[in-house]
């Protein structure tokens, strides 16, 4: 699946990838997701070269591996993270793999490392010892697909932000990341999870996962949080990536609370610093350290503590990916899994 122009994606034939380095592996992709960040590319908000292959969520089988690949082997069923890390730079040595000096993201063009994407039959995976994991027994492809991006991002939003048992959380934006964050918050012992969105179906799913749903416009999220907590939530998550969501998160957090900014920002965005300062808020931002969290997230998926499979609303053949993008763009799907 290649990007052509804003609003236009197309299936094209490409030569098979070949190993470039001793720690490379090649994965035969069996399931691959469409992510909210792929829509940024689809709309041209994130610019990549025409003809570049998109996609960064994948489960498959190792088809080839270099001599230095020791953690997985040819024939293993594996999943991988959305991006790569070198394992040896200043940041990797601190475990901050998401800020690796040589980090590259699958399917995001030259600006993020020219790594062809996973919405394809074959995927070249650099630094396979860090990026790939065997899929534990009993995990379906649909669940495993979440480990390398969506579930790891939700884990980051909750756990890295320091949620403690008995705490309260507000999740703004109930796409797959927001809904996974609801599940992680429950698993982390949250006593109250307020889930905010404007799509009734998403609110219903959040409620089924144990959250208190609040409609963004038909109801009053600030009033609801005030009523439920008396002071605001310990942790408010902007899982949207829009200035209004960020502002609301700052309003919903209690004094000395935390705002976890999981939605993507690439441009100048205004934050009411007076609110942040007077309330003594902690802002946490950036990509998730998905490589750092991967083993814990897999353990949660394997045990069933985290089960994102209800979020998969569509399975479609990779050949129909252009239709799939159109469906996803109309917000008719939560998570679409493409099958090559
Ligand atoms: Zn993604
Ligand atoms: Zn590194």
Image (cartoon, rainbow, N blue to C red):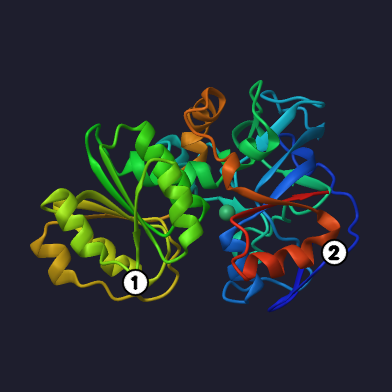
Residue 16 picture location, percent across and down: 89, 49
Q: Is residue 119 above or below residue 74?
A: below
Q: Residues within 10 Å of mark 2 (few under 14, many from 20)?
A: some
* Circle 2 SS class: loop
Q: Can you see residue 52?
A: no
Q: Which residue is mark 2?
A: 11
Does residue 132 sit above or below 112 in this rendering?
above
Mark nearer the viewer, 1 or 2? 1
What is the C-alpha distance between the residues marked 1 and 2? Answer: 39 Å
Is residue 284 found left or right of 333 in the rendered image? left
- Residue at which label 1 appears: 217
Q: Position of residue 295 (x, y in %)?
A: 52, 28
Element at label 1: loop
Callouts 1 and 2 close, C-beta under 8 Å: no
Q: Tell me, yes or no, if residue 126 can be seen here.
A: yes
Q: Residue at x 91, y 55 (%)?
A: 15
């Amino acid at each position: 699946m290649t990007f052509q122009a804003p609003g236009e994606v197309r299936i094209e034939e490409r030569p098979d990838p070949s190993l470039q380095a001793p720690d490379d592996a090649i994965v035969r992709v069996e399931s691959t997701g469409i992510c909210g960040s792929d829509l940024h590319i689809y709309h041209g908000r994130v610019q990549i070269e025409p003809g570049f292959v998109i996609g960064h969520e994948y489960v498959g089988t190792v088809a080839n591996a270099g001599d230095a690949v020791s953690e997985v082997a040819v024939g293993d069923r594996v999943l991988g993270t959305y991006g790569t890390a070198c394992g040896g730079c200043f940041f990797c040595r601190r475990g901050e793999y998401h800020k690796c000096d040589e980090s590259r993201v699958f399917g995001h063009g030259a600006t993020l490392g020219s790594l062809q994407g996973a919405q394809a039959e074959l995927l070249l995976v650099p630094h396979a010892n860090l990026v790939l994991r065997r899929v534990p027994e009993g995990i379906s492809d649909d669940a495993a697909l979440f480990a390398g991006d969506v579930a790891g991002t939700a884990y980051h939003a909750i756990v890295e932000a320091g949620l403690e048992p008995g705490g309260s959380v507000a999740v703004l934006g109930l796409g797959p990341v927001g809904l996974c964050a609801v599940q992680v918050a429950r698993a982390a012992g949250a006593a109250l999870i307020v889930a905010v969105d404007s799509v009734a179906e998403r609110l219903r799913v959040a409620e089924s996962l144990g959250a208190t749903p609040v409609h963004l416009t038909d109801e009053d999220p600030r009033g609801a949080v005030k009523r439920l907590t008396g002071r605001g939530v310990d942790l408010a998550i902007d899982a949207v990536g829009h200035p209004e969501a960020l502002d609301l998160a700052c309003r919903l957090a209690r004094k000395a609370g935390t705002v976890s900014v999981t939605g993507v920002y690439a441009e100048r965005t205004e934050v009411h610093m007076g609110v942040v300062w007077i309330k003594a808020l902690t802002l946490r931002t950036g990509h998730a350290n998905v490589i750092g969290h991967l083993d814990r997230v897999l353990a949660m998926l394997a045990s069933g503590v985290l089960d994102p499979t209800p979020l998969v609303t569509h399975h479609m053949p990779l050949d129909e990916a252009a239709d799939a993008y159109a469906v996803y763009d109309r917000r008719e799907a939560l998570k679409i899994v493409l099958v090559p």
